[in-house]
Image (cartoon, rainbow, N blue to C red):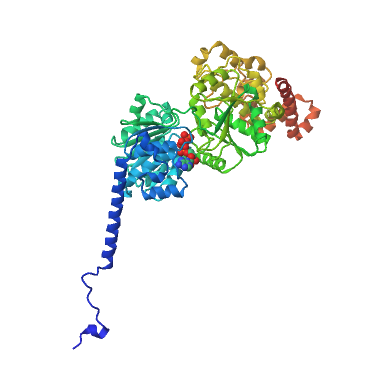
Amino acid sequence: MPGPAARLGKRRAPPSKKEKPAWAAQRAKHVSKKRAREQTRETIRARIAELETSPAGLAGLSDFDTLPLSAPTLNSLRAADYATMTEIQRAAIPVALKGRDILGAAKTGSGKTLAFLVPLLEKLWREKWSAMDGLGALVISPTRELAVQIFNVLCKAGREHDFSAGLLIGGKDLRHEQERLGTMNIVVATPGRLLQHIDQTPDFNVDNLQMLVLDEADRILDAGFAKTLAAILKALPKKRQTLLFSATQTKSVRDLARMGLTDPEYIAVHEKAVTATPEGLTQYYLEAEVDKKIDFLYSFLRSHLNAKTLVFVTSAKQARFVFETMRRMRPGIIVASLYGSQSQDKRLEIQREFAERKAMCLIATDVAARGLDFPAVDWVIQLDCPEGHETYLHRVGRTARYNRKGSAILVLRPSEKPAMLALLEQHQVQLSPIQVNPNKMASITPSMAGFCAQSPEYKHLAQKAFINYVRSIHFQSNKKVFTLAKFPATSFAMSLGLLVPPRVMLGRNRHDLKNQSFELAKLANAADDSDSDASHADSDSDVDDDNFTQMPTKKRKLSAKDAAKADGGVVTRMDRMFSRQNQLILTEGFDRLRDATVLERSLPASATATTTAAPGAAREAAGEADQKGRLDPAKDAL
Ligand SMILES: Nc1ncnc2c1ncn2[C@@H]1O[C@H](COP(=O)(O)OP(=O)(O)OP(=O)(O)O)[C@@H](O)[C@H]1O
């Protein structure tokens, strides 16, 4: 009798012993793939062991695919159009692949970022690093901008890998970072934020760290970061590979010990180069006194409307003032400014715009000097002299990057020229003199004097720019280059649109002030003599600067209360306003009221009605008078 199966149809034959179920076939495939991958790893390890890192051995390497690198890295590099290695990459990657610590130095724009990112990715790949293993590699950068840039290159060079990577640069919500940090394999960080997470994020486990990279190592070694770095190194495991890179390198043994390097290989590919700067860079210096700088910049921009120009100045105040001047003067090219006190988002937005545009001028402090990779910068202008040869090299390194061409102009005051040129020559930097065609030099001082007369904000910026410039010279350590002796304070002030030089306190505190040298005190007091009656606003206004303390005023003004007492009346809002030391912080409304009242007080009663009805006209009248007073001396000076 047929069974139930028969009723349902033909019974299937039992599977032969040779035919495996689907899951088993899949498993076998997986195992064989794994074996193949393991074999590839073994082959690459063997090739690395055989790598010859002597100069002769390295000479045979040119393209990335001549190196024993994993397929994900090679594919990613290919996709990003990185084919041929630069000199530092050819010298450093093989040594790093062999597991040695490295102290790498190469000119700016020579491709150091990939020189450390490729070995980093390879190390984790050879160790079969996965999400479960946590943090495997750490890159520390001195600035947020540079960290973002490194992170972007990492995303390109590691796009075919499965590692997770994160950016820790502060300015973002700490909690948000904390939640994700536990799963990161590679972290790019600035020192402060990194230490904060080491201290405060329980999930951030650094015990498995395989590789530590310090980019712009000499800057991280600077006093500002030294303590933070020491604390970070203390928390990291001792057994790890450490790579240090910079364009300007130190070999000091003590410094190396501080960085935690073990028997490092010193790789300085451009050490014997005749010049310390990239070959495509043409370098000039322009001799110009401080009062001619802004005219020069304006004239330069007017005649380079299709160029991408990066201008370096000493301080954020300078950057703000020069930017504001160019914005008002409209030289015919887009102008922006970049300095440390801007918000992080704003800085990143400005950088992005400067990177994308073909023609633009960016006025920046040294926050943009190191490491930033803006494509195709045509000109770097150092409107203010750098503090030393290292800053010079970093600044000019923003142009002529990776085999491109670029030009740089260093503006030197006559007193700075001999010592600065000698210092640069000592460090293999040769500059040729350049002169401005007098027919192309425009004078914008009269317009700036007009801006100062019309806008208290602008005048305030001009005063701060003056003060910060003078102070920056005073606090420079290289006294052979930077001196305030014979400083043309008055003509400099006038070149910024000011009638008289604002008062500058050159000491950091009262004690310093007492010990100011005679010349400095003379400079600081120059303003007092010329300015005693003319413009108390100039000397009184610049009070609440971050690193500036106002000189005590000679004559104490009557307080609102005293004034009211003298009048025998009550203290009114107006009394308080007139007794303010810093009139420039008044709101626009107060300003209008004040101008109108000043005229009201000085005009006969019959005229009062018309004046108060048109405060704008009163302001204009006051402005015009002020402007006239300011324009004449400026003309003389130029
Ligand atoms: N092998 C390569 N092939 C093509 N372009 C490259 C290669 N290596 C680097 N570059 C490009 O060269 C430029 C400079 O590289 P990078 O920023 O790494 O230089 P750097 O030496 O770190 O400079 P700095 O000292 O100023 O920080 C970048 O635009 C980068 O994309």
At which x and y percent is residue 275?
50, 28
461 or 308, which is in the foreground?
308
Q: Is 333 above or below relative to 501?
A: below
Q: Is 196 above or below relative to 474?
A: below
At which x and y percent is residue 67?
37, 44
At which x and y percent is residue 232?
35, 34
Q: Looking at the image, which residue sits at the far bottom?
A: 1
Whether residue 587 is visible to the viewer of this picture, yes or no, is: no
Whether residue 154 is visible to the viewer of this picture, yes or no, is: yes
Residue 455 occupies quadrant: top right
Residue 68 occupies quadrant: top left
Q: Looking at the image, which residue sits at the far right?
A: 606
Left of 58 or right of it: where is 583? right
* Image quarter in which the N terminus is found: bottom left
At which x and y percent is residue 600?
74, 28
Residue 412 occupies quadrant: top right
Left of 246 or right of it: where is 2? left
